[in-house]
Amino acid sequence: MTNIPPPAEELRILDHELRQLDARRAQLLARRSWLLGVLRSAEAPAPAWGPARASTQAQAQVPAVWSARAPHPRRPEATAPGVQNVLLVLGGILLTVAAIAFTLVSWGHLGIAGRAAVLGAVTFAALAAPVPLLKRGLRSTAESVAGLGLVLTVLDAYALHEVALPEVDGTGYAAAATALLAVLWAAYGRSLGALRLPLPAAMATAQLPLLLWVVAVDAGHHTITAALLMTAAFDTVVALSVPVRSVRVVAAVGACGTGAWGVLAAGWLSWEATGPSAATRAAALLALAAAIALGAAWRAPAAQAASGLALTGGLITVAAAGGVLRSVLPDAWTVPGHLLCGIALLAVRGTWLPESVRRGLRWSSAGVQALAVAWALPLVTVVLVGPAGWAERVWSGAPSDARDAVTVSTPWPSNTETAPLVLAAVAAVLALAFRAGSHRSAALSGALGLAWAAVLVLPATLELPYLTGLFILGVTTAATLTAAAYSCHAHVSDDGPARQTEPPARPRPSPITLTALGLALLTSLHLVALSLAAEAATLAVLGSLTALFAGVATWQKHEIRAVSAAASLAYATALACATGASLDWQPHHIALLVLLVPASAALLAPRLKDAAPTLSVEITGAVAALVAIDLAAMEPPVLALVLALCGVIAAGTAVRPDRRQVGYAAAALFVLATWVRLASWEVGSPEAYTLPVTVPALVVGFVRRRREPGTSSWTAYGPGLSVTLLPSLLAAWGDLHWLRPLLLGSAALLVTLVGARQRLQALLVLGGGTLALVALHELAPYIAQAMGAVPRWVPPALAGLLLLALGATYEQRLRDARRVRDVLGRMH
């Protein structure tokens, strides 16, 4: 059987073996370094035969000694192929410059025969030289010489025009020359397949002939645009069919460039079209561009490129069809026409087109719809923000129609009469296109928002009567709030069976619920802003909204109860303020009416039996109380009454076991009410302000010590006594009469005696300290008078005697001080 050592012994063995392995590895690395140094020295050139060589051989017979690793040789900063390419490129550039200089400057010194002979010979030599160079394997040199030959052919064409054909139009000659050069270069590149430069150069030159030709014949804008698009089509075909990668890259770049210029030119022609005929011709050009893009998308090997091309083709198709519709429809229907064409692209779903093409067309449709919605957003913003101007013209009179109601501070955008139709159409597309799938909730939320925006701007767009517009907005508020409550309730019901075996958890509201709730609140605010124009409308709207949100808050259990209850109380507060203003009440009288809201909130909160609605109701009630306090701030007697009533409400809330902390707020409100009342009576004595705080505080402290005997006297009685004793002491030191010091001293004496009787530290220290300071205050005049009669040497002498006495009895004084400290420490 295998003998397994103990863990400690086995660990010692493992550590020993690991140390041996590390030592052996170090030896092997040192040996490897020495061997590398030997190999590098062997590769170095051997010196001449002589004494040095003999000594070297003698040293070689000595036993090897490991040495340090030899330094790495310095590496060149540039590779040999790189140097070669740089030299070849520079040589080709210099030869090209020399040829151009010869053609442009020194040409006139030769006759016709000499000129032809020189250029022909040089060009032929440059084009023929790559053949032997390729046979010798000098490909880079052949590329440089071939590039020089291509440039010389361009110079030959230029020289031919200048000498033999000077009367021929330059643009037309350039078109023919570029076409011929493109063909010749392509043939040259095909014949010498090893060269990579001629074919891309031929493809780049092929971009010019058609465009130069239409310019030469003074063609119109439509013909030039067609030439650009035909060139783009040719480039597209080459990019999708030619196997040479460099040619495909040049063709793709040319297709994108000429196609972009062609699309921009065609779009400009469509925008500038003044009639159906011109719009149709521009649409034909755009259709050609769309066909090129869609054909390329169909044949594109990469799915991402196919989707992008299909997206571009879809947008161009919409621009083509929309341009024709724009020429025959009013200006207000331009965007709806383009939107209709964009929605029509969704018909590709389920067709035989490749999935990448269908995806791109769907994205193009989504882009058109997004642009249409962006066009309608300024009108929605005007309708939402415009009624804010009624805040400065409250109850100044109802406007004539809904458009005047929303344009009180902002102008109405022109040609936006079809915005509701656009918003409704996009909402319908979202609702129908995402009837299933993971994006259904988000799509339905977006559809709900767009439908709401369409309804919001409809009254102002149609210039409906003012009251009709208010009614439509009220119905919209009720509908969206009901949808939020219903969707939330349905969401909870659907999740219920799945959570029967799990702990009860609060379900998260769905996106539809949150969207509907947000729209309901926004519509209600917009409705309130519009109703500020007329007094009756304001009261009716605020009352209806209060009842509506209160009704939804009582609808079973759902997640929006908290928001609905808070909104109901908020609108109730606004209704109270509007009612008081309607009755011509003063603000401090309206404050008493507003207090009905926090009182109702305090009564309603414990009956909700749900944490979130209860908290929202209480917070809203507290905010309403602050509003009431602010309204009564300018009238101190009424403010005192309002603060007292708020204290009563807070005290009633503190009765609940889970709201005991509100009792502190109630006490603070009662104290503030008392202080405001005293200030309104012009009472300046501090005791009148402090005693109403001290007495309840002492009572509370007494009750707490009865219930919790371990409570410190500082915690129970310290705050209450400090509130009265400290301000009264400060007032007594500045008081010239005898009554306040007498009463304060009597009270301090009573507190000190009670502290001594009950052995309470706080009462003894606070009462005794106050009594001593009051006595010092009373003796201060006599001390000052006595100090004036005593010689000046007496105080230093007395101080010295005191120090001597203290020094003589230092130990006894320390023992007495410790005894006093222990006595005070045993007190509570």
Image (cartoon, rainbow, N blue to C red):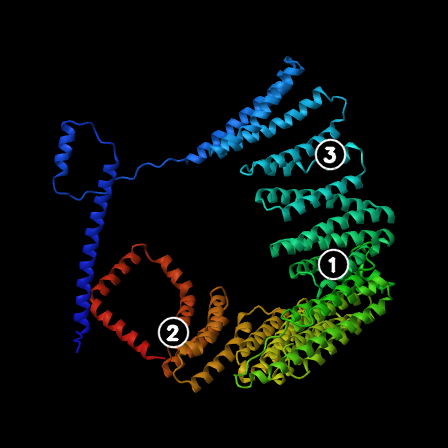
Q: Amino acid type of disc 1?
A: Leu
Q: Is residue 587 visible?
A: no
Which of the two residues, 484 or 546, is positioned nearer the viewer here? 484
Give the quarter of the image for residue 435: bottom right
Q: Amino acid type of disc 2?
A: Val
Label 2 secondary element:
helix
Q: Quadrant of the C terminus?
A: bottom left
Q: Indicate the position of residue 355 as horizontal and vertical percent values.
A: 65, 62
Which residue is denoted by mark 1 in the rendering?
377
Report whether 665 appears left or right of 220.
left
Q: Amino acid type of disc 3?
A: Leu
Give the quarter of the image for residue 473: bottom right
- First in sequence, mark 2 or 1: give its number: 1
Mark 2 Cα within 10 Å, few/some/many (few <14, many 20+)? some
From the viewer's perspective, is the residue at label 3 or at label 1 nearer? 3
Report whether 822 appears left or right of 573.
left
Q: Which mark is residue 765?
A: 2
Which residue is denoted by mark 3 in the rendering?
212
Mark 1 Cα within 10 Å, few/some/many (few <14, many 20+)? some
Q: Indicate the position of residue 411 as horizontal and vertical percent values.
A: 80, 54
Q: Indicate the position of residue 584 as horizontal and vertical percent values.
A: 79, 70
Label 3 secondary element:
helix
Residue for point 49% across, 73% down: 724
